[in-house]
Image (spheres, grey):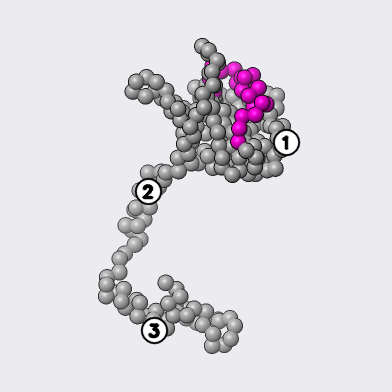
Amino acid sequence: MTLNIPCEVWLKMLCYAKLALPNEVTGIGVIEYAPDDDGYVRNFTVTEVQIAPQFTSGSYCEFKDEALHGVYSDFIEAGRIEDVQKLRFRWHSHANGQVFFSTTDVKDINRNNLNIDWMVSLVLNVNEDVIARLDNYQPFRNSVPLDVKIHNTVPPELIEQCRLDIVKMVDLLSERDQRDFVSKIDSGWNGIENIPRGGEEDEDLFRPGEIV
């Protein structure tokens, strides 16, 4: 089973982890999933993450009382009632230490303060190491390690915008024009005119061929 993390979501968690140094930081997020053709769920995707009021130190982090209720209320006020049940992703950093589920982490997972039938947990550090697990509470209790796949593919809309920019802005030099351009550089043209020079009076800022 795989936990998929879009690049922007991963970078946000990593940014929180680095900015919280030397301490840990914890957060919550939205999980989406869809069954495969055979009806089994094998892939989960984290679509967004955030942090909430918490206590933290170099080896511990915990939400403050009512912090999660505040997150739920914000979702409801934003008209996202259906997404409240998708808040099944708990993550925290181990600063620059190793990633593993400590005894404290396991106790927190077993406590299930999200009060849901399953959840996904993740630990990362600032060195970009990561580990994740799926925990089921109903109809029976079990834990399953998850592979983590961080997606850093370029969004299709960005590729299309760049393609249009290339078509609009970029013209190819003909072989003759290219030879003329190279000969200009080789002849001593340095690409600047009437610009005050620094250093010695006759010293060029650029030597022929440096600007290519």
Residue at (30%, 66%) from the top-left corner?
A: 172
State which tag comes first along the sequence, 2 or 1: 1
Q: Is residue 6 visible?
A: no
> Element under label 2?
helix
Q: Amino acid at mark 3?
A: Ser
Report, in whole angstroms, how far the alpha carbon at label 3 lies from the one at label 2.
Answer: 39 Å
In-image side of 143 versus 189 (left or right)? right
Choose between 167 and 86: the one closer to the eye.
86
Quadrant in the picture for residue 63? top right
The residue that label 2 is drawn on is 159
Q: Amino acid at mark 1?
A: Ser
The residues colored magenta run 99-119
State which tag comes first along the sequence, 3 or 2: 2
The residue that label 1 is drawn on is 57
Residue at (42%, 81%) from the top-left corner?
A: 189
Where residue 26 sits in the image (x, y, percent)? 63, 33
> Element under label 3?
loop
Which residue extends farthest bottom?
202
Residue at (62%, 38%) from the top-left corner?
A: 98
